[in-house]
Amino acid sequence: MRGDNLVPLLKFDQDIKFIQGVGPNRADLLNKELDIKTVGDLLGYYPYKYIDRTKFYRISEINGNMPYVQLVGQILSFEEVGEGRGRRMVAHFSDGTGFIDLVWFQGLRYVMQNYQVRVPYVVFGKPQVFKGRINVAHPEMEKADATLAAQVGGARFQNYQQQLFGEEGAEDVRPVMNAMAATSGQNSSLRPAYNTSERMKKRGLNSNAVSKIMGNVMKMMDRELPETLPAFIINRYGFISYDQALRNIHFPSNPDMLRKAQARLKFEELFYVQMNILKYTKERSRKIRGIPMPHVGEPFNTFFYHHLPFKLTNAQKRVIREVREDMKSGKQMNRLLQGDVGSGKTMVALMCMLIAIGNGFQSCIMAPTEILAEQHLATIQSLLGDMSVRVELLTGSVKGKKRETILNDLLNGQIDILVGTHAVIEDKVVFSKLGLVIIDEQHRFGVAQRAKLWLKNEVAPHVLVMTATPIPRTLAMTLYGDLDVSIIDELPPGRKPVQTIHQFDTHRKSLYQRIRKEIELGRQVYFVYPLIQESEKIDLKNLEEGYVNICREFPDCKVSKVHGKLKQAEKDAEMQRFASGETQIMVATTVIEVGVNVPNASVMVIENAERFGLSQLHQLRGRVGRGADQSYCILVTKYQLTTETRKRIQIMVDSNDGFEIAEQDLKLRGPGDLEGTQQSGMAFDLRIANIARDGIILQMARDAAQEIVDNDIDQHNPNYAVVWNHLKELRKSQINWGAIS
């Protein structure tokens, strides 16, 4: 048994500089590059893949199309090639059956100081061909163990190679690898691979070095780590212990134990995310009282029976009932309303605001842009007709006496509904009795901005958050786990699904013919160009070229142009020209993704559609199909596409269901890349779980967390003490738990 002097190193909050193989310099590098400061941070830095290191290949049989290979051989000589930025170190390497080059573009001094000629090395890397020669760039290298070194030497090397590999090439050499693994604290044929930065590799801290450091930590773990889940969860799901999981995730004893370790740690990660969300939600509902609104009220009934322009869909009716139940419960409503573009969210929002007015309270709807706020104002006013409900607009453009009048009337309770942008959260904007806050396209607002609205009352107003970005169920459980979710999954009657067509950019003639026919019928057209931040200038040029081409192809049409470089007033003016029908064609970037409602626009042409994600393509497609006419979305791409891109385009052609598309996007791109999710709260990285693939585990974790929160929110039950204690420890960690909840 190791001495007690090692016990402090088992503490998860211990500084990593005291671990063998780290020291102050490497600790500083790990901190800056990977945000690893403590032993706990390091142990939580899981491998991103595992490599079967039991197979060796002969150089004579490898080629540039093979995946990662493992070789045993010697460096025959070094050669420094090139100058300046093209300078590189080349080691000529042989195993007796052939020759390859090992190449380093960085860390040349480290290579010369640490690697020697005529010494046997195990080399691991990806072979590729450059000028007819096979090379491996920045390979992982380690010396063969002492036994191998004694066997290998000079003229005997080729005999050794034949002895090791026989005549069949790649062979199972577990005895050799087990001997080598034993010297580095690893005893598995599955070797972990860790993500490392270029700066780390340059300073000799590659995946193999991280693995050795991790092995040193494992050696110090001379006793079993304490459990982090209650016994009933471990028994219910048949999980291995936390100690076994952590050891096997880094150095799996076999593939089965690796699978068990992954299952345990994925569950645990998702379980504590859900514990945090559900605990917050439960405490919030107990502490924060809501405004009771017991009546449906006269304004709602008047609108429903005398002003409703069309029959509500069953989905709209269901959502209004859900909101109504929340508002009369005496608890603060905190609800997310998801609905595809054109599904009728604004109608639902208005009817909910009328309930608030009927109970003597004001309402506020906040939109991300002035033009969208103006659109909401126009829609609400046209729906209300001659009803005695006062609606006003407050944006940055409303100034002088008009602004002063609105602020006074708002304070005096003479305004029933305030429509605005972020201007409504300014301190000078004071309500008389704010009862309901509706936030449209909420991912465009920060958490702090949203919170300012419901701090304008002593009693927090009810909150309805709306989004036209369909969010997969698993992602919603994590991003918006503290919100009740309502979904409008039907389109209003009379809406025809948009027909989506994929067309290659070589078929311009037929594309323009289709567009001419639509314009001749009196309809309008969008042309959208991608705008990617990294190559903004190039894309702006594409848009300008596109604008010139469109003007030349359609000389009888007036064309609007909108992009992010324009001032807001210029953008709004161009959008209004298009909305009013003054221009027939709008050439734009993705700034129109959340924009004006133009029912007469029937064609959306998306240039370079291969450069967009599915969710963004779906959002853009939602700009058309808002009238009774058949509308079209034409996805223009180059002919040569990757398999994944073709799959994405085909999904768009086959489906108009935003939720199905969002699920596919989540699987293809991951949660961090989904349109809107990073702005909307996905400010944390899951270390091992994957929301797209681990939906079943997520549901299990949420159910277990819900059970504990329901039974022991006051934290008195000793059976759950391990959970509450571990949650407290996690909240002290680097994870941005505030973003999760």
Image (cartoon, helix red, strand yellow):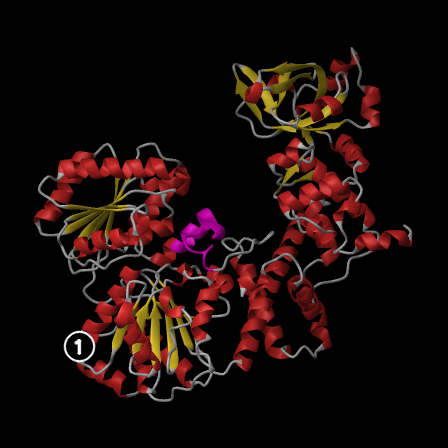
Question: Residue 295 location, x and y as percent?
Answer: 34, 89
Left or right of 16? Residue 626 is left
- Hey, what amino acid is under mark 1? Gly
Q: Residue at x 54, y 73 (%)?
A: 281
Disc tally is: 1
* Magenta residues (range): 662-680
Foreground residue among 45 and 112: 112
Question: Residue 232 location, x and y as percent?
Answer: 69, 69
Foreground residue among 428 and 618: 428
Query: Which secondary structure lies at badge 1?
Result: loop
**In the rendered image of this protein, does residue 290 appear above or below residue 35?**
below
Q: Is residue 341 visible?
A: no
Question: Residue 622 location, x and y as percent?
Answer: 28, 56
Q: Is residue 394 visible?
A: yes
Q: Is residue 665 magenta?
A: yes
Question: Residue 718 location, x and y as percent?
Answer: 73, 76
Q: Which residue is mark 1?
A: 385
Foreground residue among 586 and 76: 586
